[in-house]
Image (tube, grey):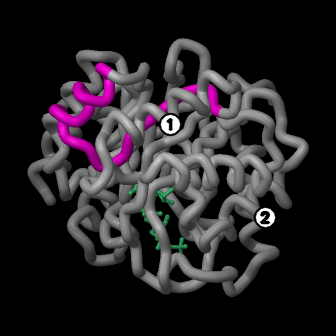
């Protein structure tokens, strides 16, 4: 099979920042850790299989972060996939510290961002990170210092492009006055569209929009959940409908569904093949 005929390719492609051409259905590697996104996963061998299978299926955008584990997710990506195939885009992040399971605290002082970038380069086995995302804007640090440090890292060749996470339209524009921003990663799924204004802004400015919790961290995949009846009618699974809806919603949409299982990964990537009509798209939106 060529890249064009691999299952993920059916989602179509988007070029992030003018030169990172990716299939619009990616993979989020946050679930490859222990409970509370802390420590090692229960089944590290399955985690490696998930990553390798994702690439086999044509996924070429993998999202991770220093804080997933911390570092567990990045180290698994390196173990499973290094040396990386041409064209694989690994997007990582910094800006959240961890003090235990489910504990996330913003920290984006310049020296911390620099340290975490150096550690991510080492843990991923990269000389340059393709997409480096500010995980959270730190309200205690001047924005110029946070984004300014990312620009310095970019000038030094340690990162290729800069992305943002959990930001408002106003924050995107503030950051764009300081740097070239290529993507935004916000919470968004068919059941939670509170970032609609940010998505519209990304469409207008041709920024990649990476919706996190694309299947509402599993809630939308649940048997008997809000998409269950429609899924039965479509002959698809609820998770697949949640992803097909996102792909249909916008050409800048780059969902990164997360899973720790090969079977769920295969099911999720197969959603790239589903085409929703305008009526079906609207009916799903109304159903949740
Ligand atoms: N920027 C941010 O602040 C931020 C925050 C959160 C997440 N993220 C990123 O977004 C990615 C996606 O978010 P997420 O992984 O938390 O949530 P998600 O993709 O909405 O859902 C993942 C959950 O759904 C389950 N699941 C996945 N596929 C399934 C299927 N086909 N059938 C049934 N259950 C299924 C998974 O369990 P199994 O493991 O059992 O499949 C997992 O518990 C993350 O991996 C991470 O890269 C970013």
Left or right of 115? Residue 110 is: left
Is residue 247 at all visible to an observer of this figure? Answer: no
Question: Mark 2 highlights which residue?
Answer: 49
State whether residue 275 is above or below residue 73. above
Is residue 272 at all visible to an observer of this figure? Answer: yes
- Where residue 182 sits in the image (x, y, percent)? 44, 25
- Where residue 54 sits in the image (x, y, percent)? 69, 50
- Would you say residue 261 sits in the magenta stretch? no
State whether residue 47 is above or below residue 250. below
The quadrant in which the C terminus is found is: bottom left
Pointer 2 or 1: first along the chain: 2
Q: Name the mark on residue 149.
A: 1
**Quarter assignment of residue 132:** top right
Badge 2 crowding class, 10 Å Cα cut-off, few under 14, some 14 to 19, many 20 or more, is: some
Residue at figure coordinates x 64%, y 82% from the top left: 39
Residue at figure coordinates x 77%, y 45% from the top left: 56
Q: What stretch is highlighted in magenta?
A: 159-177
């Amino acid at each position: 099979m060529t890249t064009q005929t691999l299952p993920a390719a059916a989602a179509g492609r988007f070029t992030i920042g003018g030169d990172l051409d990716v299939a619009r259905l990616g993979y989020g590697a946050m679930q490859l850790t222990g409970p509370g996104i802390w420590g090692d996963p229960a089944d590290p061998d399955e985690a490696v299989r998930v990553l390798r299978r994702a690439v086999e299926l044509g996924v070429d955008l993998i999202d991770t972060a220093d804080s997933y584990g911390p570092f567990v997710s990045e180290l698994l990506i390196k173990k499973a996939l290094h040396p990386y195939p041409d064209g694989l885009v690994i997007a990582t992040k910094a800006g959240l510290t961890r003090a235990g399971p489910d504990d996330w605290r913003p920290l984006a002082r310049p020296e911390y961002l620099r340290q975490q970038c150096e550690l991510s380069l080492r843990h991923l086995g990269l000389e340059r990170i393709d997409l480096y995302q500010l995980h959270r804007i730190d309200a205690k640090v001047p924005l110029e210092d946070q984004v300014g440090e990312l620009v310095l890292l970019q000038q030094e060749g340690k990162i290729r492009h800069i992305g943002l996470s959990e930001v408002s339209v106003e924050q995107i524009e503030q950051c764009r006055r300081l740097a070239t921003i290529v993507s935004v990663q916000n919470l968004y799924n068919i059941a939670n569209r509170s970032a609609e204004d940010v998505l519209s802004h990304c469409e207008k400015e041709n920024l990649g929009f990476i919706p996190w919790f694309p299947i509402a961290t599993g809630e939308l995949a649940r048997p008997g959940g809000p998409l269950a009846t429609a899924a039965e009618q479509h002959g698809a699974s609820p998770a697949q409908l949640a992803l097909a809806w996102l792909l249909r919603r916008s050409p800048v949409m780059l969902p990164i569904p997360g899973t720790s299982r090969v079977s769920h990964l295969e099911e999720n990537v197969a959603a790239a093949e589903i085409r929703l009509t305008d009526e079906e798209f609207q009916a799903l939106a109304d159903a949740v």
